[in-house]
Amino acid sequence: MPETGYVVAVVGVVFAITFGLRALPFALVMPLRESAFLRSLAAWMPAGLMVVLAATTLRDAAGASLGHLPHAGVAVAVTVAAHLGSGRSTLLSVGAGTLTFVGLVHVF
């Protein structure tokens, strides 16, 4: 069994590293709060995530079975329409697209 001092030292080092790694992003972002780059990133990130999700869905649908490709296309269209129609609510649009895809795959 390790000595108490050794265990305390290991826990202290682990705590310091974990705390530092968790605090570092906040410390780095503080000077960049008014950065044009971060504002641009905040504006484009949701659309970029939607593109990645759509591409992944279409790739997986084409890879699994070509029969699912039309379902995926309809789901992508529903996702885009829901995103534009809901005031750009990412959660609502992704949910609507997912439900559409799953529903179409199980019904047809």
Image (cartoon, helix red, strand yellow):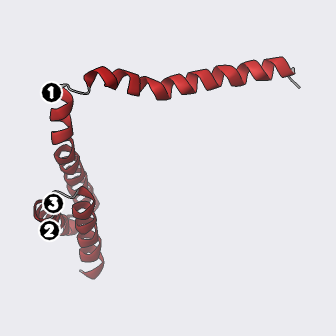
Q: Which of marks 1 and 3 is nearer the N terminus?
A: 1
Farthest-out residue, bottom: 107
Disc 3 residue type?
A: His
Dot 2 corresponds to which residue?
A: 74
Q: Which of marks 2 and 1 is nearer the N terminus?
A: 1
Residue drawn where x is 18% and y is 33% of the image = 39
Q: How far apart are marks 2 and 3 (CA)?
A: 14 Å
Visible residue check, residue 2:
yes
> Relative to residue 59, is residue 5 depicted above or below?
above
Q: In this view, does 26 lie to the left or right of 46?
A: right
Q: Nearer the viewer, residue 67 or 101?
A: 101
Disc 2 residue type?
A: Val
SS for callout 2: helix
The label number, if any, that marks residue 83 in the structure image: 3
Q: In this view, does 25 lie to the left or right of 51?
A: right
Q: Distance between the residues labelled 1 and 3?
A: 25 Å
Nearest-to-viewer mark from 2 and 3:
3
Residue drawn where x is 28% and y is 59% of the image = 91
Disc 1 residue type?
A: Ala
Dot 1 corresponds to which residue?
A: 36
Q: How far apart are marks 2 and 1 (CA)?
A: 36 Å
> Relative to residue 51, is residue 21 depicted above or below?
above
